[in-house]
Image (spheres, rainbow, N blue to C red):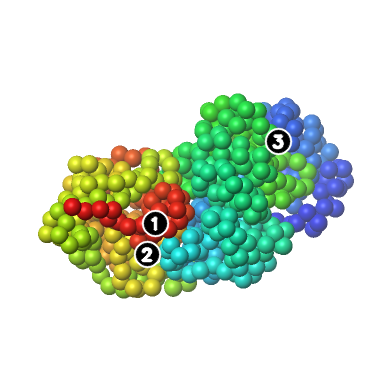
């Protein structure tokens, strides 16, 4: 699988052998460092690394026999030489950035390999969107492998997407140079019940000899879980507790433990290794979803590794989980994930294995970052105009579109309410007793119940689905709208004022997508995301600054949740329990069926 201009191993094998033997000179030698060997979990002091044609030729106590007049030398000066970090499961779109700008944002943090699932853009632009992401990914100075999205829609019959992904699409994509496997199989009920379409996608992937990504978002570890495991997914990142992690690895799956911007699932699962003593080679660290603010201010995979160490994990085990384990899982152990001969020369120099300062990053044998600063160009694709014109609302919205009409004669109703859970992807199915005024069901802000709406934006149908949500803590007169609405990516609007909800929705129609916050009838924050309504091709620092203003605007409206925007963006994710909203109505994700908004009335 060719990466950018890097030669494949067969293309440079003869030279690697000659350099290791001392018959030819290396392009680069990293001298005098502590070699962190993730194959053996050893730290070996006073070692050198010799690199040729972007690959490692020799690692040993003295590479002077590989040195020549044209050889560049980097003095490690006793620092640790660790493999470039790998993210085993993530969505570039969650950073609100294109692949190029995402790469630019994470290079300084030591991420040199990402396994990405662009199922967000697949829901908006279909197979073409996947191809655009794939093509820009291959242009970058780091390794970005693409998993072909499996589920668009994520739950057939419960939502309508802009495009659908078919088994034929999956089979076609398996021939593309950067496709590493199948993206997370979110339709786990389909797999459990033997859905022919889902099994055909898995079969097309396995026939191509590639890896099937998993997504089992249920606490049920009984026969349903075993049926899913039998269906072929090779990994899963939806575990939230130790029992989840253990169940997965016992069934031959890799447990992917995530620390994203809003998902904190490492601490509760890593005890399977640190306390139960399970084989750590079956555990992988990943981010899943990281927004631009996290990337700019906190880090990427370096943040996850530090967190795992803080949770009691041995630093060398944590590094395995973010390098070799990931590479092995995707069939790339001979290609990357360790500082050993033949592999891509992706190396980090760091002075401390616990705090993990990323001081020098080398990818493909070239320095790409120092002290957190990216030093290389990250090329952009020329995105077509229609990829920037995807917010098709059909009509402008008014306050009347956000009215929830009560049953005839009702004075009060009992309504189903989506309950937001801080720092977790699942929601709670709540109920609320709500008043009725002039035939309209009212919110209950004193008890933190406001409105949520899903505005259709793919086919210009002009439809709006309304419901109630609790947990954001909003007060006063406000609304927040976003065209990032996993996974169907219609528009989610949450607010305390129907008038502001209409203003926010229409504003996103004007700018072609993004996130906006209105308070007292005025816009107080805007993040423009013109590409598919999901991404910006502006630099991460610029997008992060606007995203920070958006977070501050949410706080001004009374919301104190950690990374509340991520919670907002998942309220239409109809594959994670318990209650979600879609363009078809309210969805009970414990039963995978539609449910009524109003339970009863008096």
Q: Classify 303 as above or below 4.
A: above
Q: Are marks 1 and 2 in contact (CB under 8 Å)?
A: yes
Which residue is rendered at x = 53% and y = 70% of the image? 128
Q: Quadrant of residue 503?
A: bottom left
Q: Position of residue 567 (x, y in %)?
A: 38, 47
- Residue 18 at least partly seen: yes
Q: Quadrant of residue 338?
A: top right
Question: Element at badge 3?
Answer: loop
**Is 209 displayed left or right of 457 in the figure?**
right
The residue that label 3 is drawn on is: 38
Which residue is rendered at x = 63% and y = 35% of the image? 319
Mark 2 packing: few (<14 Cα in 10 Å), some, or many (20+)? some
Q: Nearer the viewer, residue 141 or 122?
A: 122
Q: Position of residue 414 (x, y in %)?
A: 25, 50
Report, in whole angstroms, how far the alpha carbon at label 1 lies from the one at label 3.
45 Å
Residue 584 tag number? 2
Mark 1 packing: few (<14 Cα in 10 Å), some, or many (20+)? many
Mark 3 packing: few (<14 Cα in 10 Å), some, or many (20+)? many
Q: Position of residue 451 (x, y in %)?
A: 26, 53
Which residue is rendered at x = 51% and y = 33% of the image? 268
Q: Nearer the viewer, residue 535 or 108?
A: 535
Question: Element at badge 1?
Answer: strand
**Is 348 displayed left or right of 267 in the figure?**
right
């Amino acid at each position: 699988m060719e990466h950018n201009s890097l030669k494949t191993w067969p293309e440079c094998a003869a030279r690697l052998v000659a350099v290791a033997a001392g018959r030819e000179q290396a392009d680069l030698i990293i001298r005098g460092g502590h070699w962190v060997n993730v194959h053996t979990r050893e730290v070996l002091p006073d070692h050198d690394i010799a690199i040729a044609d972007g690959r490692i030729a020799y690692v040993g106590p003295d590479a002077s026999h590989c040195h020549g007049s044209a050889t560049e030398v980097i003095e490690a000066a006793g620092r640790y030489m660790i493999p470039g970090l790998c993210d085993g499961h993530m969505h570039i779109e969650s950073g609100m950035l294109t692949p190029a700008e995402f790469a630019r944002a994470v290079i300084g943090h030591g991420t040199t390999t990402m396994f990405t699932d662009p199922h967000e853009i697949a829901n908006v632009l279909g197979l073409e969107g996947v191809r655009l992401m794939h093509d820009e990914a291959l242009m970058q100075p780091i390794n970005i492998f693409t998993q072909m999205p499996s589920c668009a829609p994520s739950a057939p019959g419960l939502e309508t997407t802009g495009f659908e992904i078919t088994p034929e699409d999956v089979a076609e994509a398996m021939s593309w140079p950067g496709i590493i496997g199948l993206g997370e199989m979110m339709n786990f009920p389909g797999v459990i019940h033997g859905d022919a379409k889902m099994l055909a996608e898995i079969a097309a992937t396995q026939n191509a000899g590639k890896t099937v990504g998993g997504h089992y978002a249920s606490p049920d570890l009984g026969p349903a879980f075993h049926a899913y495991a039998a269906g072929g997914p090779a990994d899963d990142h939806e575990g939230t507790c130790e029992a989840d992690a253990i169940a997965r690895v016992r069934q031959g799956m890799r447990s992917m433990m995530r620390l994203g911007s809003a998902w904190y699932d490492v601490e509760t699962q890593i005890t399977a290794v640190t306390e139960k003593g399970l084989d750590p080679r079956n555990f992988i660290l990943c981010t899943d979803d990281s927004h631009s603010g996290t990337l700019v201010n906190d880090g990427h995979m370096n943040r996850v590794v530090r967190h795992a160490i803080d949770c009691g994990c041995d630093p060398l085990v944590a590094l395995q989980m973010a390098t070799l384990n990931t590479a092995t899982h995707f069939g790339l152990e001979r290609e990357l994930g360790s500082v050993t001969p033949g592999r891509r020369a992706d190396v980090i120099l760091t002075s401390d294995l616990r705090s993990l300062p990323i001081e020098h990053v080398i990818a493909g044998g070239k320095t790409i970052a120092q002290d957190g600063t990216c030093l290389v160009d990250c090329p952009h694709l020329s995105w077509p105009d229609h990829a920037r014109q995807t917010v098709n609302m059909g009509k402008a919205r008014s306050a009347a579109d956000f009215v929830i009409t009560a049953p005839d004669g009702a004075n009060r109703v009992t309504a189903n309410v989506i309950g937001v859970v801080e720092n977790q992807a699942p929601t709670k199915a709540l109920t609320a007793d709500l008043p009725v005024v002039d035939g309209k069901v009212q919110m209950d802000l004193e008890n933190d119940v406001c409105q949520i709406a899903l505005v259709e934006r793919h086919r210009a149908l002009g439809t709006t689905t309304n419901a109630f949500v609790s947990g954001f803590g909003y007060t006063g007169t406000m609304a927040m709208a976003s065209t990032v609405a996993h996974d169907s990516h219609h528009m989610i609007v949450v607010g305390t004022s129907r008038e502001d909800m209409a203003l926010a929705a229409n504003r996103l129609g004007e700018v072609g997508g993004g996130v906006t916050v209105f308070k007292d009838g005025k816009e107080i924050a805007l993040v423009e995301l013109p590409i598919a309504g999901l991404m910006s091709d502006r630099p991460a620092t610029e997008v992060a600054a606007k995203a920070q203003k958006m977070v501050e605007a949410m706080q001004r409206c009374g919301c104190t949740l950690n990374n509340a925007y991520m919670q907002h963006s998942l309220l239409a994710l109809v594959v994670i329990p318990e209650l979600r909203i879609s363009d078809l109505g309210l969805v009970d994700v414990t039963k995978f069926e539609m449910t009524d908004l109003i339970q009863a009335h008096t």
